[in-house]
Amino acid sequence: MRRTVFTEDHEAFRSMIRDFIEREVVPVYPEWEEAGHPPREFLLRLGELGVFGIQVPQEYGGAGEESYKYYAVVAEETARAGVSFGSTGVHTSLVLPYVLAYANEEQKKRWLPGFVTGELMTAIAMTEPGTGSDLAGMATTARLAEDGTHYVLNGAKTFITGGVVADRVLVVCRTSPATPEDRRAGLSILVVDTSSEGYAVGRKLEKIGLRTSDTAELSFTDVKVPAADLLGEEGKAFSYLTHNLPQERLGIAVNSYAQAAAAVRFASAYTADRKVFGKPVAAFQNTKFVLADCATDVDAMQAVVDRALEAHDRRELTVADAARAKLFCTETAGRVIDRCLQLHGGYGYMLEYPIARLYADNRVHRIYGGTSEVMRAIVAKSMGL
């Protein structure tokens, strides 16, 4: 069915991104996988293309677009080619909304121009080794100096996407004790310069997928952070973090749908070319039925994603709406990609085939941004259960 969610401008952007990927990403992608992230030169190229500045206001060097659909196009086109842009999704889809919503004018003038060009890459650090999803239990602290000029940051974070290449990291920390009435009170966000003394990148974590997306452990030992780098108000971090959850989960749903659609494309091409017992694998009834089921699942995911994209652009996407979209698309994509890998036989298990990368890359979608179990709890609560 014809999609109506994208305009001519979106499709022109898609054509540009598709050509760019084929020309400048696909040929060198194995090198990125070996290195664990794209080179800095590539990030600057994305800045030149305007990818980082789509939603940044024009006065700071961006395009001033409010629609999230351009980033959905990037997700679809990278998945289509079986590649990724590393950890840049965190930069544009996770960090930027916090800066736009809570940074003051001085901070925006200081950070956003470099954000747009790729000269200032960002990440966000919430998770700690001993707390996982329990943000209220975090142990990283920041104490305001007696003269009020700076905070002294101490602690550690883990599973930080973009933590290796970031120039600034939004660090969620405790600036005052929790209260008996509210464990989530006292949390703040500091925008930390990664060149600061006492700031250290620990292990680059080895994942089963997302091999070009750098994920790291971070540690802070008496790191001095200027008070001017506090994002928003002290003690308000938890309410800030919930603000962007719908977009974060929508982005994961979009990526899951895009990867499932790519898997069907890869499996269709492979089974049409691969011969077994003297005829193409696609000629067998089982193959046809599996691909028909997968294509139908992808159509259903597309409908869910497109509806969510429209709702998000209208500022109507609720936490429960995003949870439903993420739950359905991530769980369904997992099944679709698994079945498409099966159609590749033994070659599907080889990393030289994009279906293997999709299989490994997609698995985390049911974990980060809130696990499937958390999504079910959110949906159930919205039902009054």
Image (tube, helix red, strand yellow):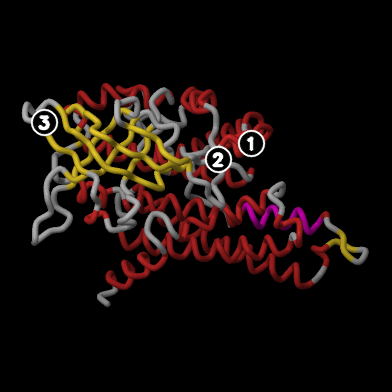
Question: Mark 2 belongs to which amino acid?
Answer: Thr
| Along the line of sight, the residue nearer the viewer: 97 or 174 | 174
Q: Identify the image quadrant of residue 229.
A: top left
Q: CA distance from mark 2 to mark 3?
A: 39 Å
Q: Secondary structure at mark 3?
A: loop
Most extreme residue toward the left is 146
Give the percent coordinates (x, y) of residue 366. Answer: 46, 60
Per the rendered image, the range of residues in magenta is 262-272
Q: Position of residue 109 (x, y in %)?
A: 26, 22
Distance of mark 1 from mark 2, alpha carbons? 8 Å
Mark 1, other Cα within 10 Å: few <14 / some 14–19 / many ≥20: some
Q: Residue at 60% across / 66% down in the picture? A: 296
Write the residue at 9% across / 56% down. Answer: 179
Q: Above or below — where is 308 with respect to 30?
A: below
**How packed is label 3: few (under 14 Cα within 10 Å), some, or many (20 or more)?**
few
Give the label on residue 145, or none. 3
Quadrant containing the N terminus is: bottom right
Q: Earlier in the sequence, mark 2 or mark 3?
A: 3
The mark that comes first in sequence, 1 or 2, is 1
Numbered circle sitting on residue 340: none
Q: Is residue 55 magenta?
A: no
Q: Residue at x 60, y 52 (%)?
A: 358
Q: Tell me which residue sits at (46%, 65%) in the image.
A: 328
Dominant secondary structure of the residues highlighted in magenta in the image: helix
In this rendering, which labeled residue sits more in front, label 2 or label 3? 3
The residues tagged by marks 3 and 1 sit, at their Cα atoms, a distance apart of 46 Å
Task: Determine whether 203 is above or below 185 in the image.
Answer: above
> Residues at badges 1 and 2 in contact (C-beta under 8 Å)?
yes
| Structural crowding at the residue carrying mark 2, measured as other residues with C-alpha within 10 Å and reported as few (<14), some (14–19) or many (≥20) | many
Residue 130, percent from left and from top = 32, 55
Give the residue at mark 2.
212
* Residue that mark 1 sits on: 29
